[in-house]
Image (tube, coloured by chain):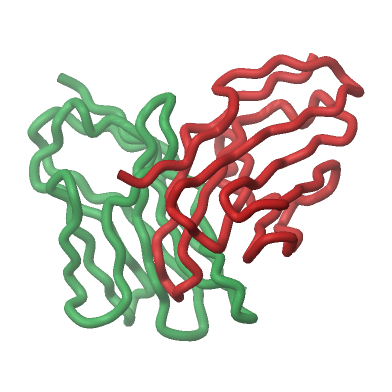
Chain colours: A green, B red
């Protein structure tokens, strides 16, 4: 079965600094990969997704992610963090094997932004 | 603008009560999902439905049931609420096409006393 690992539970950065959130996955076929963001008190919102093609994917809010098959990684990056980026970030891989179209989520990384 | 709504943002219930959490989507999506979210555990799938009257267990179905009588509505039922079901519950929907993103509701924070 597929799995997703987000090794960092919390990340603290200063406003204006660059950001990289790590995501590693285990999946037997070409994966569909997603990054979602959850602001305090909100549901999840899609930041970006990768299906195929260019391995560098651009998303909303200035985020990008790079798919590296050799490392089984799909790390999320942002060159300059804003205070409003403080949130919980979830990486997901899908679909579940057996044909049910259900992504598997990582445990999340909480981003703290210092002024 | 697409929308998934959940009937309550906050809910407080007593142990042993039967609890209904409602979710409605306006996007004509075939698939709908219920997750619970707990700190450090991420999102865990309780049940999902791939079409009306069709459902399948997720990773943690014990103590829960679901109902989907209409395409736009997916209900989560706690047959007899227990304190260990205190959690944030998230509903989501998606089109059936492979790889399509999920759209999430704002969540229901359920407290069982």
Apparent side of residue A30 relative to residue B79 in the rendered image (left or right): left
Task: Out of A88 and B107, give the one closest to the viewer.
Answer: B107
Looking at this view, is B85 or B108 the one in front? B108
| Residue A31 figure quarter | bottom left
A31 on left or right of B54 = left
Q: Position of residue B33 (x, y in %)?
A: 60, 52
Instruction: Pinpoint residue A72: horizontal percent, then vertical percent.
Output: 38, 74
Residue at position x 87%, y 19% in the image: B15
Q: Is residue A111 above or below residue B30?
A: above
Residue, far bottom: A29
Q: Identify the residue shown where x is 21% and y is 28%.
A: A84
Question: Residue A100's quadrant in the figure?
Answer: bottom right
> Nearest the camera: B17 or A10?
B17
> Residue at the location (28% across, 80% down)?
A52
Residue A46 x %, y %? 33, 51
Q: Is A55 displayed left or right of B99 in the figure?
A: left
Residue drawn at (55%, 33%), measured in percent from left and top?
B6
Q: Is residue A68 above or below residue B12?
A: below
Q: Quadrant of the N terminus of chain A?
A: bottom right
């Amino acid at each position: 079965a597929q799995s997703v690992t987000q090794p960092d539970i919390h990340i603290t950065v200063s406003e204006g600094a660059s950001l990289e959130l790590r995501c590693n996955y285990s999946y037997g076929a070409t994966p569909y990969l997603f990054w979602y963001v959850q602001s305090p008190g909100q549901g999840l919102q899609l930041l970006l997704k990768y299906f195929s093609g260019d391995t560098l994917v651009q998303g909303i809010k200035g985020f990008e992610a790079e798919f590296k098959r050799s490392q089984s990684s799909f790390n999320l990056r942002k060159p300059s963090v804003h205070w409003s980026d403080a949130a919980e970030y979830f990486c997901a891989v899908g679909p579940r094997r057996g044909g049910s179209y259900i992504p598997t989520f990582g445990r999340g990384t909480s981003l703290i932004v210092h002024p | 603008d697409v929308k998934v709504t959940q009937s309550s943002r906050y809910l407080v219930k007593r142990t042993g009560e039967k609890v209904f959490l409602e979710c409605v989507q306006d996007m004509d999506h075939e698939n709908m999902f219920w997750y619970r979210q707990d700190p450090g555990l991420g999102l865990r799938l309780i049940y999902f439905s791939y079409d009306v009257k069709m459902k399948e267990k997720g990773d943690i179905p014990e103590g829960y049931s679901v109902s989907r009588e209409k395409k736009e509505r997916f209900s989560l039922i706690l047959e007899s609420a227990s304190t260990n079901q205190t959690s944030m519950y998230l509903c989501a929907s998606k089109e059936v096409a492979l790889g399509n993103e999920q759209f999430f509701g704002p969540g229901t924070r359920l407290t069982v006393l």
